Amino acid sequence: MSTGVIIALIVIVAAVLVVAAVLALRARGPRHGGNLKRRFGPEYERAVARHDGDTKAAERELADRVERHGSVRERPLEPAERERFEARWTAAQERFVDSPREAVEEADRLLAELAAARGFPAGGQYEEQVAALSVHHAHHVDGYRRVHRVTHARADGERDAGAGTEEMRESMVAARALFDELVRPAGHHDGGRRHDGPRHRAGADGDAAAPAGRAHHSWSFSKSRPKES
């Protein structure tokens, strides 16, 4: 084989490799960079911080989450299921005044069960459940992390019980946003208010909706949230 033919073959092979690399980068494009940042929002920044500013490592992690959980199809709740979940959240919220830790523990259990009911990994697989939720509810999943962290934190004997209570209160307020997204009827984007069954009314500042005829309790333990008039 002549030298000219060998050189020509080398050039052709190199060209094929370049084209393949470009096509591979284009195929990966929608999963990386700006698209991931838009999709994950605060989760993107959280991943970057966890990887000490290494955006490439953060993007690989987020792309892997999409690969594993992007195909999850959320199962709509039956009206009776929704009623039960709403009633349990309202009860946990009311319990906070006297037993804040028990209320937060119930909120943690409730979110795990609600997510599983919607088709996400079961609550016994907490890390996988949170990863899946972050793909579909990136802007609110951190509230679940907060109540879970408070629930499972070691009881070291807090020096400032007031600060501990405030942390629990804030975790429940943050978790409520995810609860609203998961419990609302499919296709509704009006803050989670019901459109079927008994009429509900929203509480102060978006507090738990309460069925008609049932007394509504505001977040009276929060100094920053006004009670209903």
Image: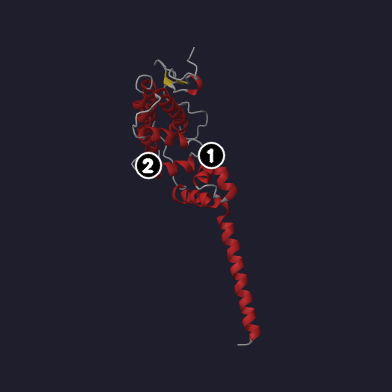
* Numbered tag placed on residue 126 in the rendering: 2
For the residues bearing labels 1 and 2, Cβ distance under 8 angstroms: no
Q: Amino acid at mark 1?
A: Pro
Of residues 228 and 192, the one drawn nearer to the viewer in this rendering: 228
Q: Farthest right residue? A: 4
List x then y, in percent, for residue 179: 44, 31
152 relative position to 209: left or right: left
Q: Is residue 184 visible?
A: no
* Image position, residue 94 (x, y; %): 38, 20
Q: Is residue 203 left or right of residue 114?
A: right
Task: Report which residue position mark 1 lands on.
Answer: 42
Mark carried by residue 229: none
Residue 26: percent from left, percent from top: 59, 57
Does 30 appear above or below 187? Answer: below
- CA separation in Å, label 1 and label 2: 20 Å
Q: Relative to 2, is 195 above or below?
A: above
Q: Amino acid at mark 2?
A: Tyr
Pick the front one: 227 or 221: 221
SS of the residue under disc 2 = helix
